[in-house]
Amino acid sequence: MSLLQLEDISKKFGQVVVGEGITFQLEQGDAVGIVGPNGAGKTSLFAMISGDIAPDSGAILFDGHNIAHLSPAKRARAGIGRTYQVPRPFENMTVFENALVAAQQGARTRGQKSYDLALGALERTGLAPFANRQAGSLTLLHRKRLELARALSTAPRVLLLDEIAGGLTDLEVNELTAIIRSLRSDGIAVVWIEHVVRALLTTVERLLCLASGVVVADGEPKSVLASDAVRSVYLGGRVLETRGPNE
Amino acid sequence: MSIVTPGAKQHGAPSVRRSSTSPIYTLVGALVLVILLTMAPWIVPAQASSTLMNFFILVIMATMWNLLAGYAGMVSIGQQAFIGLGAYATLYFALKGVNPFVTIPLSTLTCAVIAVPVTFLLFRLRGGYFAIATWVVSDTALLIIGAIPFLGGGTGKLMPGLQSLSPAQTAHYSYLATWIVALVVVTGTYLLLRSRLGLVLASIRDNEVAARSAGVNVQSARRLIFVIAAAGCGAAGAVLAISQPFIQPLSVFNIQWAAEMLFVSMIGGLGTIEGPIIGSILYFVLQQTLQQYGAWYLIIFGSLAVVVALWQPRGLWGAFRERFHGELLPVGYWLREPK
């Protein structure tokens, strides 16, 4: 039984297809990267897994149970943590309180246990020195880390990371990928949407390419990137294909 | 205000405190204030204690409105529904022979019970639509109550059960009742905001989507807050009914109540406990000083609200807190490094 299993997920917004027959499985401790052009349906896929939007059809199984009807809060409590592409800190709360509410509600802990969990997440993401700062006063890097810390505080089994390295410097990206790699050794499965492919390659062992809501490639990262399907998605396949043999 | 020390954790871990300053001063200050306000009817003239009573009613209403709008993100312009229902519940129980002062908790409970089904209607709507719907609820309640002859219909009815007391006794007892309700509401709100639920509410206030993905059950937190706010406003309505013993539907269901709650919370600072109290003080000071200018005082109030909304959206208390980083009633969590 897979930890997370998507079966034939489809979703349309009017005429815009963001998911068509998406099927994939994730095992405990897996690290999967998702790439694809803008509008391919990557973030929508996360939203369907975390419950922010409902798919038109298909099933989502988490730990063998269908979670398609559960609210985002219940899914978070079940062990699906996510970060948002544009960080959404609780701006008027301190960094520690941001993590604490996730530890108390997402991981269902109380008292000292919740303090330890939240603090552990802050230490892990390097935010401990900022624990008493208002989250609204954080820089972009720290906001991204706070997204991660808050997701970790819910004690997730699957972590959905949405472009967490976007907009960061190389050094910052390296620090972040080191944290993410360390999560894998704890048995947390990571699904990571990222345009910074170099960062992805240091961390994931499997890559999925999404285009117009369809999974066009899924497999070992280097071979996925080299595949014709992915090349055609990024470089305009038709043109290359027709020109190739003729010239 | 307790200091939480790490349990069996390894030595040297940071400890979590619930306030950045010593709570002793706040505690002593609160105690002195409680004693003074309890003694007020013996100390100050009758006129002043009647003003204080109106002040307490406003503090109760504003504190409840602040929970709704400032924390749970529900802007209601129909809270007068529960002021009216609280007042009429008190009238109903008193007509049935219950001592008016005993009816206060009963009316509070009645409003809480009525609020539960109302949430199922209202929570289908968001934002502005929600606000309008609360007004509809209030007017519906007004129309229903106005159609019940036993409760005096549209003209109203005199509150029974108070005639055996002398006017001075009535005034004194209603002062104490109002003061106790205000104390319970403010203390209760403070304890609520310090609890796990307080953190949940603050997270919803700041970012609802993120709160959900952090595992917060937004809907049930909202429902609980709506019911609490209804109960609090019901209690305000009950003490109002006792202090102004002729109860008329158009006055207890007046939208003026909602306007006052909104004004006071906004001026004082939404999303803080202190805000509505500061706002209420300002409201009464302004009212006392400006009432000789007739309608002008409403214009001044309106302009003040606009100015605050534009330039100081966090209100007076928000501005104070930003500058001095002080808190009278701390609800947060502070990490302290071991010495």
Image: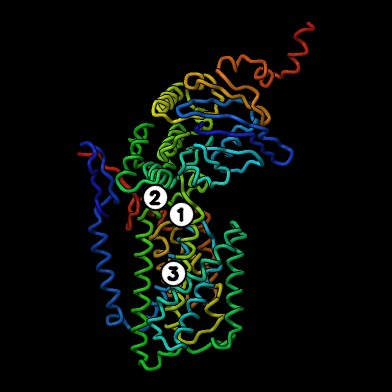
Chain to which the residue tagged by mark 3 belongs: B
Q: Nearer the viewer, mark 1 or mark 3?
A: 3
Q: Name the residue carrying label 2.
A: B322
Q: Are marks 3 and 2 on the same chain?
A: yes
Q: Are marks 3 and 2 in contact (CB under 8 Å)?
A: no
Q: CA distance from mark 2 to mark 1?
A: 9 Å
Q: Position of residue B137 (x, y in %)?
A: 59, 70
- Nearer to us in this view, B98 or B57: B98
Give the quadrant of the N terminus of chain B: bottom left
- Report x, y in % for residue A189: 47, 30
Residue farthest toward the top in the current orientation of the protein: A247
**Can residue B266 be seen from the camera position used here?**
no
Mark 1 highlights which residue? Answer: B314
Which of the pair A171/A192 is nearer the observer?
A192
Residue type, label 1? Arg
Tell which circle, 2 or 1, labels the residue nearer the N-terminal end.
1
**Which quadrant would residue B12 be assigned to in this image?**
top left
| Circle 1 SS class | loop
Residue type at mark 3 is Gly
Residue B232's disc number: 3
Whether discs 1 and 3 lie on one chain: the answer is yes
Instruction: Find numbered disc 3 in the image and state the secondary structure of the residue it sits on.
Output: helix
Tell me whether the residue at label 2 lies in contact with that at label 1, contact meaning CB atoms closer than 8 angstroms: yes
